[in-house]
């Protein structure tokens, strides 16, 4: 099957057709997710929580990300593959380049980094070497301890302005995709309209160019973890199998019935 490219994602933004993204961490799910029509698979460092059982993403190493990236690349049929760069894997520009290269060699088509202005030289360096970069703003879980918990970001005017100006600067530095996590829907809309690169939201409302969820969350596998922005697609009457649930997710994102108002922050 023909693989999607970054170009395909820009074409979807241009057509105003929502981009569908899910996480996966192994070959079996990567195959199922891509065969169900999901366009992008994110090997997220959320694996620290849903695979390794930690209570944050902080313990995850670049080697562990490479291992899961290799597993996903084996099972993937047609999706575009993004690998998260984990905690402190891009603390310096040199580290960023060598760790990003390892993820690309493990099968990634793009790497994702969390942060704003401080990342600009790093993004320039990596993209200049031919490695596509997805930026990540809003709630950046690797900084959970300085943010004081998993909280909605950009609710006051100053921080909303900062996120918007970071987003523009990241695009100018060479980022070609942007994840917006847990920000008010109006802010995500404003950013998505201001940027030429596609935005992918999680807890960021309905107006981003695409949506992403953690696979385990949208399958309702953790009854203790039910944040507002997640919908359990296994709870749909029509979802008899995991495959059905993923197909329903793709359909809901494409028809813009997910996220609904109850999944959004303001
Ligand atoms: O690690 C992850 O799964 C992510 C998404 C939630 C965007 O970064
Ligand atoms: Na992540």
Image (spheres, grey):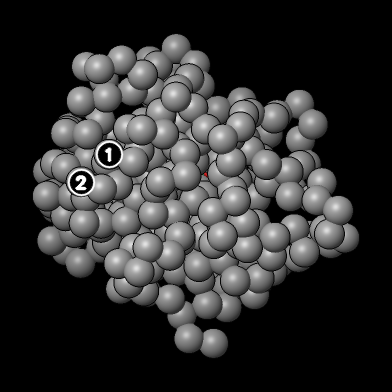
- Placement of the C terminus among the 4 image quadrants: top left
Q: Residue at x 68, y 46 (%)?
A: 218
Label 1 beta carbon less than 8 Å to ligand 1? no
x and y percent of residue 15 in the render? 35, 69
Assign the N terminus to one quadrant of the image: bottom right
224 left or right of 101 in image? right
Vertical order, 21 against 62 (above or below): below
Q: Residue at position x 48%, y 20% from top?
A: 151
Q: Which class describes the residues within 10 Å of circle 2: few (<14), some (14-19), or many (20+)?
A: few
Residue 198 appears in the rendering:
yes
Residue 259 appears in which quarter of the rendering? top right
Q: Which residue lies under the disc numbered 1?
A: 190
Residue at the image position 58 percent from the left and 41 percent from the top = 260
In the displayed structure, 143 sits above or below 181; it is above
* Nearer to me, 170 or 168: 168
Label ID, residue 6: none
**x then y, percent, for residue 17:** 43, 65
User: Please, is residue 206 above or below residue 59 in the view?
Assistant: below
Q: Is residue 59 visible in this depiction of the protein?
A: no
- Identify the residue shown where x is 49% and y is 16%: 149
Q: Is residue 80 above or below residue 266?
A: below
Where in the figure is residue 107, as x and y percent of width and height?
45, 69
Viewer-side residue, 261 vs 49: 261
Residue at the far bottom in the pictured view: 1
Question: Which secondary structure, mark 1?
Answer: helix
Q: Is residue 84 left or right of residue 194?
A: right
9 lies left or right of 173: right
Residue for badge 2: 194
Q: Tags 1 and 2 in contact by the CB under 8 Å rule?
A: yes
Helix, strand or loop under label 2: helix
Q: Residues within 10 Å of mark 1 (few under 14, many from 20)?
A: few
């Amino acid at each position: 099957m023909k693989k999607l490219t970054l170009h395909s994602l820009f074409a979807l933004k241009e057509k105003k057709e929502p981009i569908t993204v899910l996480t996966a961490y192994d070959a079996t799910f990567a195959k199922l997710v891509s065969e169900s029509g999901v366009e992008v698979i994110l090997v997220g460092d959320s694996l620290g929580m849903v695979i390794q059982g930690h209570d944050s993403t902080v313990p995850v190493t670049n080697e562990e990300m490479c291992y899961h990236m290799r597993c996903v690349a084996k099972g993937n049929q047609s999706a575009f593959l993004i690998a998260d760069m984990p905690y402190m894997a891009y603390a310096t520009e040199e580290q960023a380049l060598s760790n990003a290269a390892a993820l690309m060699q493990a099968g990634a088509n793009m790497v994702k980094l969390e942060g704003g202005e401080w990342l600009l030289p790093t993004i320039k360096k990596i993209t200049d070497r031919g490695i596509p970069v997805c930026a990540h703003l809003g709630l950046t879980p690797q900084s959970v301890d300085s943010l004081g918990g998993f909280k909605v970001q950009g609710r006051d005017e100053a921080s909303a302005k900062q996120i918007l100006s970071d987003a523009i600067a990241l695009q100018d530095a060479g980022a070609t995709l942007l994840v917006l996590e847990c920000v008010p829907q109006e802010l995500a809309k404003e950013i998505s309209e201001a940027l030429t690169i596609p935005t992918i939201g999680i807890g960021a409302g309905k107006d981003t160019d695409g949506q992403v969820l953690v696979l385990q969350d949208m399958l309702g596998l953790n009854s203790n973890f039910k944040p507002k922005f997640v919908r359990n697609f296994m709870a749909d009457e029509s979802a008899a199998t995991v495959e059905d649930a993923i197909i329903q997710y793709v359909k809901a994102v494409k028809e813009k019935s997910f996220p609904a108002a109850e999944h959004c922050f303001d």
